[in-house]
Image (tube, rainbow, N blue to C red):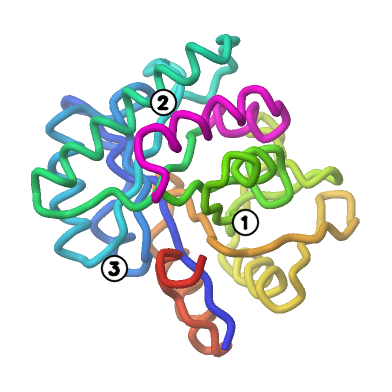
């Protein structure tokens, strides 16, 4: 029986600003990628998100990004490899400490936004991310865009890697995600999202915005918790997966 992890980015509120529908989405996912305070999040938000994830039985992950609150970590920043290493170790440490203080453990790491997308193309950036993960805890699972430099760097670093696919994003012909500034970047129709998900799981392929087919290895599936209707998307996608005979479980059990 096929299986897949279902993950979502969470804990992206900070101060008085609320982002996402974390509690509603948590009912349907198996892994939570928790913002670490750079692109979003703050100590209280990290603490609360770790608490609710533990109570829900959801695997806890760190979601490090560029230090860019105003741009939500989605603007390109050109840091050298040592800087990427340092900000990644720092951010992983924050979520790891909260998880362990609550009697839990950190299970995985997934980079956020521009850091993720830039490193998916740039081997040096990807290697710096993987070195940080390995040096903090080599048992952590590294999430990376399927078929990208993130995956290759993780293998080279001898990390367990979950190749990631996306329910609510479209793809370019080279397998990269369509940039968010593009009008077709996001999938806002849940029926189209479900169709894309089931095709990726059953055929191990995804159709690009130009109609080409791209091979994928769907270990983990992402839905963005900050998009409108995220909870409805999560509910319908998880139902479609189960109806299709797919087991939804965290990658610790399958990678």
Kindly identify the residue that appears in the image at 50 percent across and 72 percent down.
237
Kindly identify the residue that appears in the image at 48 percent across and 82 percent down.
247
Q: In whole angstroms, how far apart are the C-alphas of marks 2 and 1?
A: 22 Å
Closer mark to the observer between disc 2 and disc 1: 2
Q: Earlier in the sequence, mark 2 or mark 1?
A: 2
Q: Secondary structure at mark 3?
A: loop
Contact, mark 3 vs mark 2 (Cβ under 8 Å): no
Magenta-highlighted stretch: main secondary structure?
Answer: helix
- Which image quadrant for residue 30? bottom left
Residue 150 pos. (x, y %): 63, 39
What is the magenta range? 113-139
Residue 35 pos. (x, y %): 33, 35
Kindly identify the residue that appears in the image at 65 percent across and 26 percent down.
118
Q: Nearer the viewer, residue 42 or 13?
A: 42
Q: Earlier in the sequence, mark 3 or mark 2?
A: 3
Q: Earlier in the sequence, mark 1 or mark 3?
A: 3
Image quadrant for the N terminus?
bottom right
Q: Determine if the magenta segment contains residue 156.
A: no
Kindly identify the residue that appears in the image at 70 percent across and 38 percent down.
149
Q: Residue furthest left?
A: 102
Mark 3, residue position: 27
Q: In whole angstroms, how far apart are the C-alphas of marks 3 and 2?
A: 28 Å
Residue 160 pos. (x, y %): 52, 53
Left or right: 210, with 221 as reference point: right
Closer mark to the observer between disc 1 and disc 3: 1
Q: In whole angstroms, how far apart are the C-alphas of marks 1 and 3?
A: 20 Å
Q: Nearer the viewer, residue 252 or 55?
A: 252
Residue 31 pos. (x, y %): 37, 58
- Which mark is on residue 165? 1
Q: Nearer the viewer, residue 160 or 74?
A: 160
Mark 2, residue position: 88
Closer mark to the observer between disc 3 and disc 2: 2
């Amino acid at each position: 029986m096929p299986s897949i992890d279902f993950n979502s980015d969470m804990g992206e509120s900070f101060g008085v600003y609320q982002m996402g529908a974390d509690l509603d989405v948590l009912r349907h996912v198996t892994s939570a990628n928790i913002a670490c305070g750079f692109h979003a999040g703050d100590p209280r938000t990290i603490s609360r998100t770790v608490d609710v994830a533990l109570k829900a039985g959801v695997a806890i992950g760190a979601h490090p990004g560029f230090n860019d609150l105003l741009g939500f970590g989605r603007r390109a920043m050109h840091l050298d490899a040592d800087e990427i290493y340092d900000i990644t170790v720092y951010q992983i440490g924050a979520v790891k400490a909260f998880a362990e203080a609550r009697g839990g453990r950190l299970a995985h790491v997934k980079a956020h936004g521009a850091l993720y997308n830039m490193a998916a193309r740039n081997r040096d950036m990807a290697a710096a991310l993987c070195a940080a993960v390995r040096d903090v805890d080599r048992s952590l699972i590294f999430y990376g865009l399927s078929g990208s430099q993130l995956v290759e760097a993780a293998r080279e670093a001898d990390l367990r890697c979950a190749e990631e696919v996306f329910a609510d994003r479209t793809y370019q012909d080279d397998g990269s995600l369509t940039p968010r500034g593009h009008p077709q970047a996001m999938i806002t129709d849940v029926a189209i999202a479900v169709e894309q998900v089931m095709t990726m799981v059953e055929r191990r392929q995804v159709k690009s915005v130009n109609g080409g087919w791209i091979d994928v290895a769907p270990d983990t599936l992402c839905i963005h918790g900050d998009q409108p209707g995220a909870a409805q998307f999560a509910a319908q996608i998880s139902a479609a997966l189960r109806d299709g005979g797919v087991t939804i479980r965290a990658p610790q059990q399958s990678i």
